[in-house]
Amino acid sequence: MSRYRENHETLDAQRLDACPVDYSDVLRRAMDSLFKTFENFSEGTFIVDKDARVVWINKRYAARFGFSDPQEAIGRDCEA
């Protein structure tokens, strides 16, 4: 076996060991990444449920509507 191939296989094994094997862990990491992206949008972002109630809002958008803490907006009707 060539030295290159040995190193390549070792790196592949190390990557597999570092990868999450649990789907729920992958989902959690994806959600964390998504919400970090949402938090950094300059315009502001909020997410509502099927009843048009705020379930998440980023800091910039919360401040735009007069909330000092985004948690204050959670559960409020966004159509009222």
Image: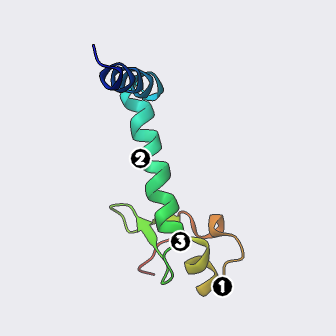
- Image quarter where the C terminus lies is bottom left
Q: How many marks?
A: 3
Q: Position of residue 72 (x, y in %)?
A: 65, 68
Whether 65 is drawn above or below 68: the answer is: below
Give me the residue at 53% from left, 63% from top: 75
Disc marking residue 45: none
Visible in this render: residue 60?
A: yes
Q: Position of residue 36 (x, y in %)?
A: 52, 60
Question: Is there a contact, CB below 8 Å, between mark 1 and mark 2?
Answer: no
- Give how far apart the Cα atoms at labels 1 and 3 are: 18 Å
Dot 3: few (<14), some (14–19), or many (≥20) neighbours within 10 Å? few
**Mark 3 element type:** loop
In the image, 4 versus 28, the foreground residue is 4
Indicate how the structure is coloured in the image: rainbow
Q: Farthest residue in the right direction?
A: 68
N-term mark: 1 or 2: 2
Q: Which amino acid type is marked by label 2? A: Ala
Give me the residue at 41% from left, 80% from top: 79
Disc marking residue 30: 2
- Give how far apart the Cα atoms at labels 1 and 2 are: 30 Å
Q: Quadrant of residue 73?
A: bottom right
Residue to which mark 1 is pinned? 66
Disc marking residue 40: 3
Q: Which amino acid type is marked by label 1? A: Gly
- Image quarter where the N terminus lies is top left
Dot 2: few (<14), some (14–19), or many (≥20) neighbours within 10 Å? few
N-term mark: 1 or 3: 3
